[in-house]
Image (cartoon, rainbow, N blue to C red):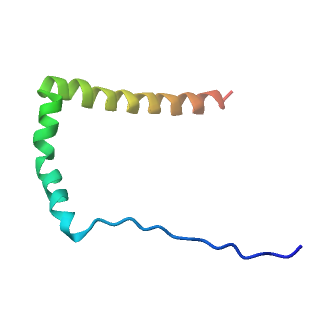
Amino acid sequence: MGRSAVRLSEVVYTVSPMKTGVLGGLFKDWPKVMAKKIGGWGDAFFFGVIPTVGVYQYAVNYKENEKQSHRY
C-alpha cells in the first residue's frame, strides 16, 4: 500500500491592530470587576481560600493513603 499526500490548511486568528486598545481596558478594569463580583473579604475568603486549602489537603491525604495502601 502506498502513502498518499494529505492537504492541510491552516487557520490563524489574530486581533486587528484597531482592536488592541480594548484588551488593555479589560486588564485595567479587572480588579474592579472582581471586587464587584466577590463583594468583600468574607466572600473572597469563603470562595477563594477555603476551596484552595481544601483541594490541597485532599491531595496530600490521597497521596499519603496511596503510600500506606502499598505498604502492607
Q: Residue furthest right?
A: 1
* Left or right of residue 22: residue 7: right
Q: Quadrant of residue 2?
A: bottom right
Residue in view at x 51 percent, y 70 percent:
10
Q: Position of residue 32 (x, y in %)?
A: 10, 40
Residue closest to the eye, 41 or 70:
41
Q: Is residue 66 above or below residue 6?
A: above
Residue in the picture at 45% in, 32% down: 60
**The quarter of the displayed image where residue 47 is located:** top left
Q: Residue at x 12, y 27 (%)?
A: 41
Q: In the image, is 48 to the left or to the right of 14?
A: left
Name the quadrant of the N terminus.
bottom right
Horizontally, residue 11 falls left or right of residue 70, namely: left
Q: How far across and how far down the image is residue 55, in percent?
A: 39, 30
Residue 46's spot in the image, x, y percent? 23, 23
Location of residue 39 by image quarter = top left
Residue at (33% x, 28% y) in the render = 51
Residue 11 at x, y percent in the picture: 47, 67
Q: Is residue 24 above or below residue 57?
A: below
Numbered disc total: 0
Q: Nearer the viewer, residue 9 or 25?
A: 9
Q: Quadrant of the C terminus?
A: top right
